[in-house]
């Protein structure tokens, strides 16, 4: 765009720029031949006119975009209402940016923040538009109305809403209502007793009126009431007289109550003393009677205590005798039981020894008979016992063909026969003893 603008400027100023020729004349002109001042201006060429038209179009488009930006930004707490000029459709936008095409869209931006309206002309009793009471007295009022726009009603009412909503909607509605409401009450009621009622009425009626225009009423606050100087002085004197009369009435009532209080205190003191005397006398009588009755019960109680102690001594004596007898009897029983237990143990031990001997004899008899029938068991037993101690045994073989270890055992067949006979004799004696 800058290059286009430079070309347009050069064309308007007619700087020395000649169309290129075949013979190189342009180089000679650019080399620096001065142009006569009296040379007449030539008409712009078609190319220059084209650049002028393009530059004008670009400048017009830039000015149009500058005056009507296609993107409009909405700050926080704002509401944008975009209306399509051809279809009439309405759309709402909150925080952010919205496209606005020049000639197609129109946008109105409304603030959704709470706003406050304070009528300044009615704040003073001597102001430009003071309020009037039912007595016709002028007074000032510090009134504050807090309101905000209704987002739900903006789409339907954005076309009818004025630019300054506070001055063209809220202010007429407030002024048209409060003058009518305050004209129903006296200054004294407005100043003291009816303030909350008046505030409630204003809020109710004003909320209905503003809602019809898409405005939400938040709160109505009634502040200071400015009274005229003469009325304030008269009210101050009247209040002072009323306060004095009220003070006198309360003073008289207080003194009357103090007199009655003194009488009541005296009567109460008298009754208290009489009751205390009667209570003291009754207490003494009751104490004497109680002591007499106590003596009647104390003597038999002492006698019963003596008898009880005698019985307890006799019972303790009998219990000690019984305990000694029981201890002796227990010792005798323990000694007898211990003797019986020892006898039983001795008999059990004798029986055990006898039984073990019989079992051993029977075992030896069986082993002797087994060895007699199988003599090689001795050799096997010897070999088993020596196997883990002796790996090789060198001994001469016997001449009679017996076991090679017979010489090591120190016996022969005769010895074995004698042993067998002895075992048989022992077996026979054991069997005979068992039968007996």
Image (cartoon, helix red, strand yellow):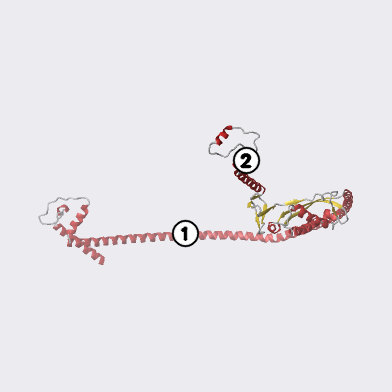
Report whether 228 appears left or right of 365: right
Q: Which residue is under mark 2?
A: 11
Q: Name above or below for residue 21 compared with residue 278.
A: above
The image position of residue 332, as x and y in percent, is: 44, 60
Q: Quadrant of residue 345?
A: bottom left
Residue 417 or residue 8, whichever sits in front: 8
Report whether 342 appears left or right of 23: left
Report whether 142 appears left or right of 318: right
Q: In the image, which disc is placed on residue 328?
A: 1
Mark 1 residue element: helix
Residue 416 or residue 186, whichever sits in front: 186
The residue mark sitting in front, 2 or 1, is: 2
Looking at the image, do the residues carrying marks 2 and 1 touch, with CB atoms under 8 Å apart? no
Taking the spot 38% from the left edge, 60% from the top edge, the residue there is 341
Q: Which image quadrant: the N terminus? A: top right
The image position of residue 35, as x and y in percent, is: 62, 34
Q: Name above or below for residue 156 compared with residue 13.
A: below
Q: Which image quadrant: the C terminus? A: bottom left
Q: Name above or below for residue 280 compared with residue 8.
A: below
Residue 233 or residue 94, whichever sits in front: 94
In this rendering, the count of numbered labels is 2
Q: Tell me which numbered mark, 2 or 1, is placed earlier along the sequence.
A: 2
Can residue 273 be seen?
no
Spatial CA distance of label 2 from label 1 is: 155 Å
Report whether 281 appears left or right of 34: right
Spot the residue most to the left. Answer: 399
The image position of residue 343, as x and y in percent, is: 36, 60
Spot the residue most to the bottom. Answer: 435
Label 2: few (<14), some or many (≥20) within 10 Å? some
């Amino acid at each position: 765009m800058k290059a286009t603008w430079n070309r347009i400027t050069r064309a308007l100023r007619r700087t020395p720029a000649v169309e290129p020729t075949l013979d190189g004349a342009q180089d000679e002109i650019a080399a620096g031949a001065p142009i006569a001042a009296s040379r007449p201006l030539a008409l712009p060429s078609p190319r220059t006119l084209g650049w002028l038209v393009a530059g004008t179009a670009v400048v017009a488009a830039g000015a149009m975009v500058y005056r009507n930006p296609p993107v409009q930004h909405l700050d926080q707490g704002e509401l944008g209402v975009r209306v399509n000029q051809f279809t009439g459709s309405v759309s709402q936008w909150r925080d952010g940016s919205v496209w606005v095409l020049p000639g197609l869209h129109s946008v109105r931006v409304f603030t959704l923040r709470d706003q406050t309206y304070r009528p300044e002309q009615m704040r003073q009793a001597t102001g430009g538009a003071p309020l009037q009471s039912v007595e016709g007295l002028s007074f000032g009022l510090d009134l504050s109305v807090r309101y905000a726009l209704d987002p739900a009603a903006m789409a339907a009412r954005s076309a009818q809403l004025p630019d300054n909503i506070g001055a063209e909607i809220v202010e007429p509605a407030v002024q048209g209502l409060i003058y009518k409401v305050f004209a129903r009450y006296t200054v004294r009621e407005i100043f003291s007793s009816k303030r909350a009622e008046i505030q409630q009425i204003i809020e109710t009626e004003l909320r209905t009126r503003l809602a019809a225009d898409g405005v939400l009423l938040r709160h109505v606050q009634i502040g200071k009431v400015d009274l005229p100087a003469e009325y304030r002085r008269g009210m101050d004197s009247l209040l002072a007289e009323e306060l004095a009369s009220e003070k006198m009435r309360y003073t008289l009532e207080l003194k009357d109550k103090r007199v009655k209080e003194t009488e009541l205190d005296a009567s109460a003191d008298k009754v208290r003393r009489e009751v205390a005397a009667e209570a003291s006398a009754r207490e003494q009588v009751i104490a004497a009677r109680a002591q007499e009755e106590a003596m009647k019960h104390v003597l038999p109680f002492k006698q019963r205590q003596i008898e009880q102690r005698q019985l307890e001594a006799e019972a303790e004596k009998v219990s000690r005798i019984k305990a000694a007898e029981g201890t002796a009897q227990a010792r005798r029983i323990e000694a007898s039981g211990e003797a019986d237990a020892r006898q039983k143990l001795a008999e059990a031990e004798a029986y055990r020894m006898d039984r073990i001997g019989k079992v051993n004899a029977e075992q030896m008899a069986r082993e002797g008979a087994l060895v007699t029938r199988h003599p090689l068991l001795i050799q096997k037993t010897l070999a088993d016992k020596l196997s883990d101690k002796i790996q090789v045994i060198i001994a001469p073989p016997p001449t009679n063909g017996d076991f090679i270890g017979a010489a090591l055992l120190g016996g022969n067949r005769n010895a074995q026969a004698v042993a067998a006979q002895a075992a048989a004799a022992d077996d026979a004696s054991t069997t005979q003893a068992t039968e007996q």
